[in-house]
Image (cartoon, rainbow, N blue to C red):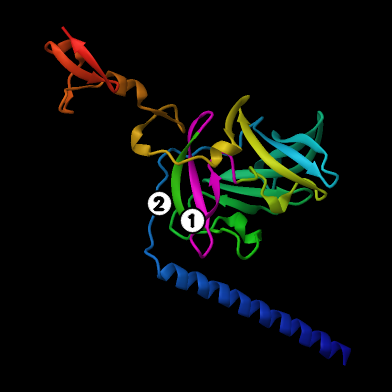
Amino acid sequence: MEKKKNSFQVWKFKAIAFLVSLFQLTNVQIWAQTSEPSQFSPSLPYHQMLKEGKKWNYKNIDFDEIVTYFSMVLHGDTLIDGKKCKKMYRIDNGIERYRYAWYEDDKKLYLIPKESDSFIMQYDFNRLNKYDAMPCTDYAPVDYAKYLIGVDVIKSSSGYMNRYRYSNYDEEWLTFCVEGVGGPDGLPMPWFQPLSNEYYVFLSCEEDGKCLCTAEEMNGEAVDPSTLDIEGGAHLKQKTESRKQTVFDLAGRKLSSIGNLRPGIYIRGGKKVAIK
């Protein structure tokens, strides 16, 4: 009798799980069909996530509301299942503790938990169709912002970076992911928190000993890519210097360099200049 009861409970659980999965899948399909699908193209070259010495800085608040600071740092390599992976450590007051490893290939990023050889895909920057989901959201709550609704560019401390925007069914911008940095919580996602008895806030990411991007910059206004020039690989630089040299007449027509102009009044850098 007990065996039959357990068998029924298992069957009931599987049936409920199937119905929930079917409901979620149907919702996604209906939602996607009611909107025009589109393909997104990042404006900048891909910015690699994993690099030796790269650091994510955090503020930690424990249950007693005591504030401390720590960093998650990529340091050293390890072979897992024949693949070269980067080890990530948590550093508190100079003390290093190994947390997990990461593996990056073809714009895909995998997390390998401590004492495990399982590769869990967290990011896939090849998913560029509207409503594509970032793999890390598979572990998130059902109503979490999972679906790609746009790709734009933000200004960071190091230049300019691609930002991917995600939403839920209501198509409100609820979260994001910045290439080379990660999501609002940095590279480690919230369901892989460093410790369970704390609440932490992402502050900034450093690369090559310099600030790559801050949490505030990740939330910044989008930049119009048409006003930018690609310079130095993954970063962009605004066309401010070239614009300063551009000359217009009073009717707004673009002219040649100021050295070849006849005497008169012209506009350069938004200001009137007199040529005698």
The residue sitting at 70% across, 42% down in the picture is 201
Give percent across and percent down for residue 108. Answer: 55, 48
Q: Secondary structure at mark 1?
A: strand
Can residue 83 be seen from the camera position used here? no
Query: Closest to the observer: 102 or 166?
Result: 166
Quadrant that contains the C terminus:
top left
Magenta span includes 67 = no
The residue sitting at 86% across, 44% down in the picture is 64
Q: Marks 2 and 1: in contact by CB < 8 Å?
A: yes
Magenta span includes 158 = yes
Query: Closest to the observer: 90 or 253?
Result: 253
Say which quarter of the image contains residue 185.
top right
Query: Closest to the observer: 173 or 52?
Result: 173
Q: Residue furthest left?
A: 262
**Residue topped by disc 1:** 148
In the image, what residue type sits under mark 1? Leu
| Mark 2 surroundings within 10 Å by alpha-carbon count, few (fewer than 14), some (14 through 19), many (20 or more) | some
In the image, what residue type sits under mark 2? Phe
Looking at the image, tell me whether mark 1 or mark 2 is earlier in sequence order. 2
Is 169 left, or right, of 42 in this rendering? right
Give percent across and percent down for residue 274. Answer: 20, 12
Give percent across and percent down for residue 184. Answer: 61, 45
**Residue topped by disc 2:** 40
Write down the region rendered in magenta: 156-183
Is 237 left, or right, of 198 in this rendering? left
Instruction: Give residue 198's mark.
Output: none
The residue sitting at 72% across, 80% down in the picture is 13
Q: How many marks?
A: 2
- Mark 1 to mark 2 CA distance (whole Å): 9 Å
